[in-house]
Image (cartoon, helix red, strand yellow):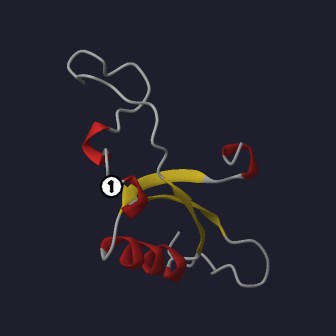
Amino acid sequence: MLESKGWRKQFVASEPRLSEAVQIYEEAGFEVHLEPLPKEPRCESCAGEENKKECRICFEGSEDQYRIILTRPKKGKDSPDDDLF
């Protein structure tokens, strides 16, 4: 749903890297949206399961500490000029 509105998933982070990443993306001219890390899907073992949904076993029990970082280019007058290209 968010992808249809122009949001692009970047990565999952917790503090202090979460705040640092948000600041860097905003300084680079992006809007930033944070989503909570879902507790599902669960998996028993990741071996050989690479083609299925993302595994979250590494986050089990601490999902509330992490956020999914999504970005999209800022629109309007606050968008930075792209003078590099």
x and y percentages locating residue 73 in the rendered image = 64, 66
Q: Quadrant of the N terminus?
A: top right
Q: Residue furthest front?
A: 61
Number of marks in the image? Answer: 1
x and y percentages locating residue 11 in the rendered image = 40, 54
Residue at image position (46%, 81%) is 23
Q: Along the horizontal axis of the image, is 41 left or right of 30?
A: left
Residue at image position (31%, 44%) is 60
- 79 in relation to 58, above or below: below
**Which residue type carries mark 1?**
Ser
Residue at image position (57%, 61%) is 71
Pointer 1 residue: 62
How many other residues sit within 10 Å of disc 1, few (<14), some (14-19) or many (≥20)?
few
Q: Place residue 14 in its image quadrant.
A: bottom left
Q: Place residue 49 in its image quadrant.
A: top left
Of residue 72 and residue 38, the one placed in the foreground of this image is: 38
Of residue 72 and residue 50, the one placed in the foreground of this image is: 50
Q: Secondary structure at mark 1?
A: loop
x and y percentages locating residue 15 in the rendered image = 33, 73
Residue at image position (46%, 54%) is 10
Q: Residue furthest right?
A: 76
Q: Along the horizontal axis of the image, is 63 left or right of 7?
A: left
